[in-house]
Amino acid sequence: MNIWLAEIWRSWRASLRRPGFLLLASGVLALGVGASATAFGLLDQVLLRALPLPQPSQLVALGRVVPGQPTLISAREYRALGKIDGVRSIGLLAFATPRINIVDHGAPQRAVVTYADRALLPTMGLDPVLGRNFSAREDSPGGPRVLLLAHHFWKARYGADPHAVGRTLEVEGTPYTIIGVLPERFDVAGTSGDIMLPAALSPDGRGNGGLYLAVARLADGVAMSTVGAQVDARLQALRMQSGVHGGEHPRFGATGYADTLHAQFGHVLVLFQASALLVLLVALVNLANLMLLRALARHHEMAVRGALGASRLRLRLPVLAEGLLVGLLGAGLGVLLASSDLRALGSIIPPQMTGGELHLGTHTLALAMLVALAGTLACAAAGAWRARAIASFDQLREGGRSGIGRHRGRLGRTLVVAQVTLTVVLLCACGMFLRQFWDGAHARWGFDDRDVLTAELSPVRADYPDAAAVNAISQRLLQRLRQIPGVQDATMATGLPVGDFFGRFFVGAHAPGEEPVSVRFHGIEAGYLPLFGIHPQRGRLFDASDVRGSEPVAIVDRTLAERLYGGQALGQRIALDDAGASGQPWQARIVGVVADTGPRDGRQRGGELYLPLGQMPDALLARFRDVHPMHLALRVRGNPDDYRKALVDAVAAVAPQQPVDRLRSMQSIVADMSSGGALTGMWICGTFAVLALLLACVGLYAVMAVAVAAREHEMGVRSALGAPPARLATLVLHSGLAQIFTGLAVGMLLAAAFPRLFEASFAQLDSHAAFGPWVAGSVCVLLLAFGLLACLLPAVRAGRVPPMRALRGE
């Protein structure tokens, strides 16, 4: 045993005395381990960790099952579930978390609200840390006004004061009594909100709209598929009873509750992990190449030791010992790199998504160490095994000048091709996102977004209960805003021309007697379309005569006109089923057709419907106000950000108790919409692509440098026979470029399949990236440029081999 330890120590001491190879190999390994540990740590803490709830595996979400999307349910569908065999209890949680108006310590402000019924907390196995849960009377329409504070909101706004329970908080102009504080675990296991209000569903579950999560706890030993089959049968029967027979055929069932919570970003993290694994593969291939070259470089020493009677294990032990040292050092550096990366990501990603501070878990550390050590030892063993044939008497006879040989360098060249192939895949993925980012930044959206300042506000319901009151406050606000120096025009609407998922409001619209289709709805003030430069293609725009009491009118965009009326929409009537009183459809006459607004990228659009804000039905407005704010827009002279204070002051002057927030320029909103997802994907793939490119170039340089050193005798002979330096350099460049072109060819074939393999991740990033000649050409140019740089120095060195030194055998 002492002999083996002494052998290992001698190998380590030799490596430390000349640390160049040690630093290079461990650095390569650290990059791969750090990237993969960062990705796995994030994936583990967000997706794989169990929710901090009792028996979290028993919690499921019931409703409409759509791959890659949350399992949601409507209020009516939730009421129709009733009692299900194998389910202990079911609770309701709103998936949408709108911002509402509150008055806290006398100051009006906006807060995020979560709606839930009284069965939710018991189903999750939670109790309030202070106070109590909702009662049956409070969780019913018209019940007492009560609320629960989220734990983080209680700490931030009330300083964790236990006497906050029992106080009054004004919500939408109505006093609410604080009856309890939610546990801290709910901040992670629920939807993010500042306060919780009772869902207070009507007994018949009126209202097919609403984004809810039906959270159920399974009984012991009950399979999720069994419960899902019952849910599908009941909700399909509800569809038939409601008279819905055609159109889409949804599938209902049960999915894991944790999967539903993370459905919005799960595929993005999978893309992150896949990119990191590709970098790890490139690093391990590079390390295998370096260890192979290291073993081949020691062939003369191995031949001498073999001639003196050393066993096979003693011959390979120095290489394995050096590999162990590289693995330990690379694992340590990789863990440090991953820790710093996670800290940086923790400052960007909200804690509600990660469940607290990001850190490397114990199993992540163990996995990183295992991958580093196992990978390095495997690479060292492969290098020692490949070099076994070199330890021969031929090496002693030639004095170690025979080099690695053409056939013996084949494995190294194959490994370089593998590195280039994997790098091409990552570079192409980055190029796909970069191309979409470029297209989005230069896209035409069908409206003028320049010099426009926007803001969100929700008229306080107690002060502005219906559409007439909302229209009145909007007119007073707009009159005041138009008096601000530099403001050219102002408007108010239910939404902006573009918006994210939660910024869009959809309704079921149809021609009388036809099946309803989902369209995006806008309730707008008369100046909205002119302010954004949206011009009529046929008919007219709204004017001052389109008020409550006059004939209801509507405007549609070209897509909706084609979809519902074959392009002949002017003068036709359009109906909204959920907007009328007593369940009767509300109808309006179409007086204008305008151009489409939105990205011109081929993505499918459902169409846009515009109604005058003053004519907006009360039932439709009530649905809208449950989940969405109103929007102000000002067209100004100069920088829109310079008008922020003036806008806030104008709102405070007209409605002192009306908070306003999210002031942004329209150009910044369009920039986020056009390139936000593509930019995220580009950063993910681009960061790892740069690492892979660096590692591939290091591997190519190492192979070429060793090949030149091994062929020094041959180069010297060629030079002595009259070969010019340019000819010798060309030989080396030809060999390197052959490896690059082979890797490019294989990599392009794999990259062509990349969008299909990660189609869900692209869709979740709102991207439509596709592999094309622009991406392929750019990657070829980039990789060839870096490959030439990696080959250039060894090629120059080959052309400068002194003939006499090579012939003397020095």
Image (tube, rainbow, N blue to C red):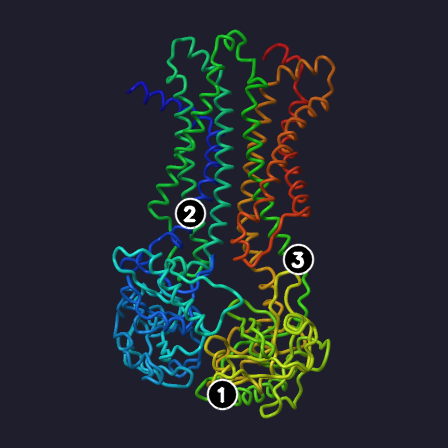
In the picture, the quarter occupied by the N terminus is: top left
Disc 3 crowd rating (10 Å Cα; few below 14, some 14-19, many 20+) is some
Q: Secondary structure at mark 1?
A: loop
Residue 536 quadrant? bottom right
- For marks 3 and 1 on the same chain, the one whose residue lies earlier in the sequence: 3
Three-letter amino acid code at the position of disc 3:
Asp
Query: x%, y% of residue 724?
Result: 74, 20
Looking at the image, can residue 356 be seen?
Answer: no
Looking at the image, can residue 720 be seen?
Answer: yes
Disc 2 crowd rating (10 Å Cα; few below 14, some 14-19, many 20+) is many
Q: Secondary structure at mark 2?
A: helix
Q: Which residue is label 3 attached to?
A: 439
Asked if labels 1 and 3 touch by Cβ distance under 8 angstroms, the answer is no
The CA span between labels 3 and 2 is 32 Å
Specify the label residue 466 is tagged with.
1
- For marks 1 and 2 on the same chain, the one whose residue lies earlier in the sequence: 2
Q: Is residue 16 above or below residue 343?
A: above
Query: x%, y% of residue 747?
Result: 59, 38
Residue 204 quadrant? bottom left
In the picture, the quarter occupied by the C terminus is: top right
Disc 1 crowd rating (10 Å Cα; few below 14, some 14-19, many 20+) is some
Three-letter amino acid code at the position of disc 2:
Phe
Q: Which residue is label 2 attached to?
A: 40
Circle 1 or circle 2, nearest the eye: 1
Query: x%, y% of residue 255?
Result: 38, 58
Task: Decide if residue 354 is on the left or right side of residue 548.
Answer: left
The CA span between labels 1 and 2 is 50 Å
